[in-house]
Image (cartoon, coloured by chain):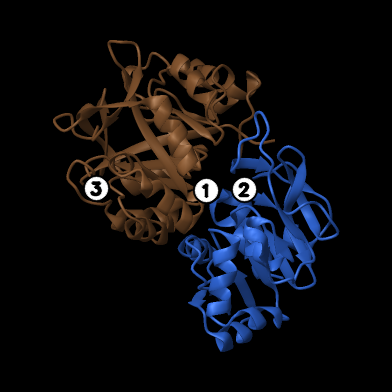
Amino acid sequence: MVVLVDAGGTNIGSVRYALQRLGADAALTADAAAIRAADKVILPGVGAAGPGMARLRELGLVDVLRSLEQPVLGVCLGMQLLCAHSEESDTECLGLIPAPVRRFVEAPGLRVPHMGWNGLSIRRKHPLLAGLDDGEQAYFVHSYAVPVGDWTLATADYGGAFSAVIAHGNFHGMQFHPERSAAVGARLLKNFLEL
Amino acid sequence: MLSRRIIPCLDVRDGHVVKGVRFRDHVVMGEIVELALRYRDEGADELVFYDITASPEGRSVDRGWVERVARVIDIPFCVAGGIGSVDEARAVLHAGADKISVNSPALERPALIDELAAAFGVQCVVVGIDSLRDADGEWRVRQYTGDPAKTQALPRRTLDWMVEAQRRGAGEIVLNCMGSDGVRRGYDLEQLSAARALCRVPLVASGGAGEPRHFRDAFVEADVDGALAASVFHSGAIAIPALKRYLQAEGVQVRNE
């Protein structure tokens, strides 16, 4: 069973519909027992890191998420919340992937937020990226990003390379929106369901 | 490298997609979900739905079709129309829209932009601006353009409003140049270039696309991030796959599936 952690992210419906298109009926839940019992856990999220962590604390889910051993996927802000720390409102995150989250620095021609379709470059072979070709595009919309590090599976380029897909142990993250990334996104979500 | 976006715009009235010329005389173009799927299959990068009568009629967008679209569409889409509060925006986002666009309600009460950005993050908040050049040569904003009888000219200068909208938390600007809308003679490159110089967030051109070269000009000459069009796509005058091949040949980075 797949669960979607209902922590107030506005894209939760879209992620759920994307999973339904793949034949997986994910339950929306903020219940600790249901999350612990799931085979796969997805943490969606659109919004800001500070309110996102505050919401997880209010729901009593911080320790629950930290204790998970099954595959976990964070999407967009959800991925950033899995990391160590975000520059967004100087927020301490879940610390499950030892990566920082930094704001894009505006530059001529480099508008923030980074919004639109950008190509993925594979850095490390991983089952999450099965069937993905270098250069295939995904839909991004974000102002903060994870730099390239040991956790990086794939990068995208926006004024320099940043992490588009990350993994550390059973914790995974996609900075783009797989639920809105057409066939590429569907394939990556399917890969996660099959981990 | 980030691709430039091709964005079909679907004006929605009473549950149908409609199109007018210079914002008047609307004719029905088709059903919402059917057209959304068609554009998705043709390689549209994003869709925008405007519930064009919501603001003039003093109501928010109908959420029923937003959810129907969200279930079947796997590309991002933005919804506009009479969204005047955080609660209304939340309802549309929870129904499955990726972004919400505000126009007339933000002109009525500019703090709405701050409130939306605080609640959902700037990446969800698009500010649409309807702009027309006045007799004195200044571009100024228009309000309630969905209904010609209710459309109002405001004293606010377009570029001033665009700068204020960004300061308040707009994550994207859609600049609809009404003087060129629906007449297919090209985007208003002069106005878009002036806007680009002051726009630090993504800028989307709207109004005037008639042939593939117009898209190329908007991307290359006005450096916009996305180009929005309606009638040329609805009528089949421009097919998105052919448009993208042309743009690629012109050196414009686009997404190909």
Label 1 in the same subunit as label 2 = no
| Residue annotated with mark 3 | B15
Q: Give the Cα distance between marks 3 and 2.
A: 34 Å
Give the chain of mark 1.
B
Label 3: which secondary element: loop
Give the residue at the far left of this rendering: B149
Q: Is residue A188 left or right of residue B151?
A: right
Give the chain of mark 3.
B
Q: Give the Cα distance between marks 3 and 1.
A: 27 Å
Q: Amino acid at mark 3?
A: Gly
Q: Is residue B4 left or right of residue B155?
A: right
Is residue A160 visible in the rendered image? The answer is yes
- Mark 3 vs mark 1: in front: 1
- Tell me whether circle 1 and circle 2 mark residues in contact (CB < 8 Å): yes
| Residue annotated with mark 1 | B123
Q: Residue at x 49, y 40 (%)?
A: B167
| Residue annotated with mark 2 | A143
Q: Is residue A63 left or right of residue B27?
A: right
Colour given to chain B in the rendered image? brown
